[in-house]
Structures are given as structure tokens and as C-alpha cells.
Amino acid sequence: MSVNNTVTIFLFYDDYEYNFGDGFYPLFENNEHNSLSSIQMTFRLIDEAWIQENNINVKCIRGLDGNVGGKLLLLLNGINKSTSNVIKNSIHT
């Protein structure tokens, strides 16, 4: 069985915080009280670490608040059937 080392998912974020606040902190859900923007993000498994692939059209993750990091790690590992315990972006490693 071959393992795909690239996973693409959709996440939500607060556009105001990204542009005028603390930066880009993705979420899994858009609750009914917020009108959050969504973005498609791709992660690649390299040397047991999930690396966010960045390009000109994709926002760089600044941080993972609360349990978002753990949930994201479980999701990426579940799709890929891997056991990584690290998420990085390609700018701030």
C-alpha cells in the first residue's frame, strides 16, 4: 500500500485578525456567530514532520490556538496513516 505524503484540507480563519490583528490562526469550524473566511491548505510529510506548503496565494500559519494543533495533527496523520507529532510551516520552522 502506498502512502501519499501530501494532504490538502480546508480550514477557517478570521480575515480581520489576519489583516489587522495578531495574524493567521486557523480553525476547523465556522461557528454561527462569526463569518470566517475559508482556505484550502496543503501539508507535506517530510522527515516525520508535517510542513505547510506555502505559495503566494496561501497564508502562512502563525500559530495553532487551543486544541487546533492536536486536531490538525490527528487529521493529517489519520489521512496519511502516519505518526508524526510535528507541524511546521515553510517560513517559520
Image (spheres, rainbow, N blue to C red):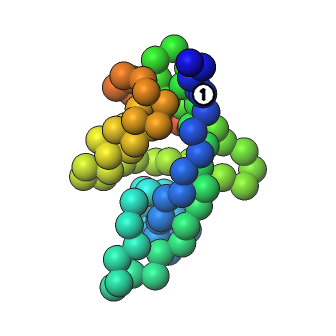
**Under tag 1, what secondary structure?**
loop
47 or 82: nearer the eye? 82
Q: Residues within 10 Å of mark 1 (few under 14, many from 20)?
A: few
Q: Position of residue 93 (x, y in %)?
A: 50, 28
Along the horizontal axis of the image, is 14 left or right of 2?
A: left
Along the horizontal axis of the image, is 5 left or right of 72?
A: right
* Depicted 84 relative to depicted 26: above or below: above
45 or 37: nearer the eye? 45
Q: Position of residue 56 (x, y in %)?
A: 75, 50
Name the residue carrying label 1.
Answer: 4
* Depicted 9 relative to depicted 90: above or below: below
Q: Position of residue 10 (x, y in %)?
A: 54, 57
- Give the residue drawn at x 34%, y 77%: 31
- Give the residue drawn at x 61%, y 56%: 40
Along the horizontal axis of the image, is 13 left or right of 69?
A: right
Q: Is residue 5 visible?
A: yes
Quadrant of the image occupied by residue 53: top right
